[in-house]
Image (cartoon, grey):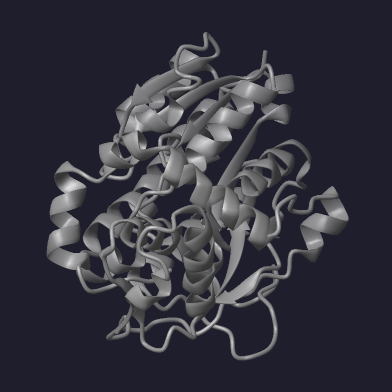
Amino acid sequence: MQTILITGGAGFIGSAVVRQFINETQCKVVNVDKLTYAGNLQSLASVSDNPRYVFEQVDICDAAEVARVLREHQPDAVMHLAAESHVDRSISGPADFIQTNIVGTYTLLEATRSYWSGLDAPRRAAFRFHHISTDEVYGSLGESGFFTEETAYEPNSPYSASKASSDHLVRAWHHTYGMPVVTTNCSNNYGPYHFPEKLIPLVILNAVNGKPLPIYGKGDNIRDWLYVDDHARALRLVLEKGKLGETYNIGGWNEKTNLEVVQSICAILDELHPQGAPHNKLITYVQDRPGHDRRYAIDASKIAKDLDWKPQETFETGLRKTVEWYLANTGWVHGVTSGDYQHWVEKNYANRSGA
């Protein structure tokens, strides 16, 4: 039985990967997560009792604990998703992003290198370290063009700068030490279990509760949207078949302005939750985020050509599934919109939003 160690497995994308591995394969999964504000074990309730699932509450900056987990569970691969990920939080408090995304990645790389070096020859040859990153490392696009795997890095926020740094560390560990790595950079994810500080779940929940739907600037910033289960399938494919040392961009070919996204959510809610319709009357334009990147768009041709991957969901089908999920899972929503998160929302996010 193959054992996959997943850092950040209680997060939004990580939990989707964990659920797929448990539900669709015979792999054992070791979920390593610090359980910060966005880590939520309720997102893994459906697989938590499976004998092939193990949870370790560990900070990836803790070298001794990371080494222990590797030693005890003897994984055949590491998928590194643990990260601080919200741009607004990185602007108001960048230190956590430097610590987790840069120092944590370094700590994990060094512990994994030591573990990998001690494996026997067959297991050493088969081992993989998969680093999961973001398209935000590339900076901002103009009105035309796409991010490719050869696009130069130009991060513009503390978050994207910290992720760019982690990408460079992974690349350096491959070229300097021979670590068997693959890297992926994805576009904006959306779907079930998304923490409600991000644009799509925030708009859904605010609209349902009759609250303002804040949009930065004119709402004309463009993002490329990717349904989270499509992303999880792509990540598993890259881990299995990706060429060592290579980077694969993963995108949904779904460019939308923030205003288009919000209008689409309102239209679905007008149909599925007619109380308060039309919901677009709640749209409120607020002061733009500092350094807000104008446009992201990924060219996903490489992963399509080399690994035969393409998204199964269109933006329209995926968004409808997402709205339906939030309407049907009020218990999960209540669980994550309390405590520390609620205090942060009241302090920092009452009049702001964005992807």
Is 12 or 256 nearer to us in this picture? 256
- Residue 29: image location, x then y, percent: 54, 22
In this rendering, the answer to whether 47 lies above or below 284 is: above
Which corner quadrant holds the N terminus?
top right
Residue 250 visible? The answer is: no
Q: Is residue 93 left or right of residue 189?
A: left
Q: Is residue 146 left or right of residue 44?
A: right
* Residue at the image position 44 percent from the left and 54 percent from the top: 273
Is 176 or 70 nearer to us in this picture? 70
- Residue 315: image location, x then y, percent: 65, 61
Which corner quadrant holds the C terminus?
bottom left
- Residue 263: image location, x then y, percent: 50, 73
In this rendering, the answer to whether 328 lies above or below 195 is: above
Residue 290 visible? The answer is: yes
* Residue at the image position 58 percent from the left and 63 percent from the top: 187
* Residue at the image position 46 percent from the left and 23 percent from the top: 70
Q: Give the total of numbered labels.
A: 0
* Residue at the image position 47 percent from the left and 71 percent from the top: 262
